[in-house]
Amino acid sequence: MSAPAPRVVLMTRQSDFEGLVARHGTREQARFFLQTHGQSLDELERRHMRLEAALQSTSQAIPSKWRRIRLERGDFSRFVFEPEDIVVVVGQDGLVANVAKYLSGQYVIGVNPDPDFYDGILVPHRAQSVKKLLAAAQSHRCELEERTMAEALCDDGQRLLALNEVFIGHRTHQSARYRVRWENKEERQSSSGIIVATGTGATGWAKSIDQQRRSRIPLPRPVDNALAMLVREPFPSVSTGTAITGAVLSRGKSVEVISEMNDGGVIFGDGIEDDRIDFSWGLHARVQVADVKLRLVH
């Protein structure tokens, strides 16, 4: 029996232009709404057209005999990936983070549809390069950049992966209450939550938190097998401390958090609150370097 044809999973998301038109019913209604608020629809429409052009060029680059499927962002969590899928992401850098948590080593080709608007750190390629990149990925002759991911494991069996960071805390602006264990120390804390960031996420939320501190920690690079744990705004009281506020977790080490929240405790990754673990009182969570990595085709 011959092997099945390669499958390309083309991933994108609704543009801001499409979202506005869907909300207001028609293009002209969306234009009128923005004009009444001193804004223009023209730039959003231009960006939408660039995205559509990149999607069309990317689709045309997929060999006609290969299998293909297109997914929108809302479909990611329900889709079953095959081990040999080649994932092509067309959109902003954050879209790669959105899908990374659902992968298990598949090759990812990131396509930047608008280099004047998106940085392109995780989507470095132009659509014109996709044909060559697909051939290289299919033959396993491509250059790869493997980025470290974070993994949160709960003692009830729930698991979550993140490319940028794992957040542990309360889903509202209330203080999160928990016990944190790091190496041979344990402390009860009340804070705005804990961030455990990868090197990819170290340039964002984690960097902002770290720069506000007197005692800063060395943040990892994207390819380092290490994570940075940062406690946000810990509050000292008669029952809570501030001794454990930051650490570097090398591979094989983990930080453990035990929830003391009756309601509202959550764990989520990369800012996606809808795909979360409900972290109620008594649950134990361990965060560590994940075995799986994001495999970006370069």
Image: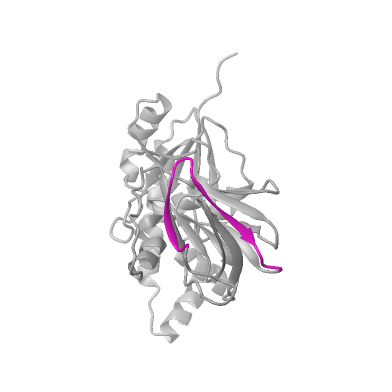
Q: With 184 as the anchor, is 42 left or right in this view?
A: left
Q: What range is drawn magenta here?
A: 244-262
Comparing 261 with 264, the one in front is 261
Rendering coords of residue 21 (x, y %) = 51, 69
Rendering coords of residue 30 (x, y %) = 49, 75
**Magenta span has 97?**
no
Q: What's the residue at 29%, 55% (across, down)?
A: 115
Q: What's the residue at 64%, 47% (across, down)?
A: 78
Comparing 185 with 108, the one in front is 185
Residue 274 in view here: no
Scheme of colours in the image: one colour
Q: Residue furthest top?
A: 1
Comparing 270 with 142, the one in front is 270
The answer to which quarter of the image holds residue 143 is top left
Q: What's the residue at 69%, 62% (across, down)?
A: 280
The image quadrant where one finds the N terminus is top right
Instruction: Work out whether 22 lies above or below 103.
Output: below
Residue 237 in view here: yes
Q: With 273 as the anchor, is 12 left or right in this view?
A: left
Rendering coords of residue 295 (x, y %) = 42, 38
**Magenta span has 259?**
yes
The image quadrant where one finds the C terminus is top left
Rendering coords of residue 194 (x, y %) = 51, 62
Instruction: Work out whether 261 lies above or below 100.
Output: below
Q: With 169 as the anchor, is 87 left or right in this view?
A: left
Q: What's the residue at 33%, 67% (across, down)?
A: 211
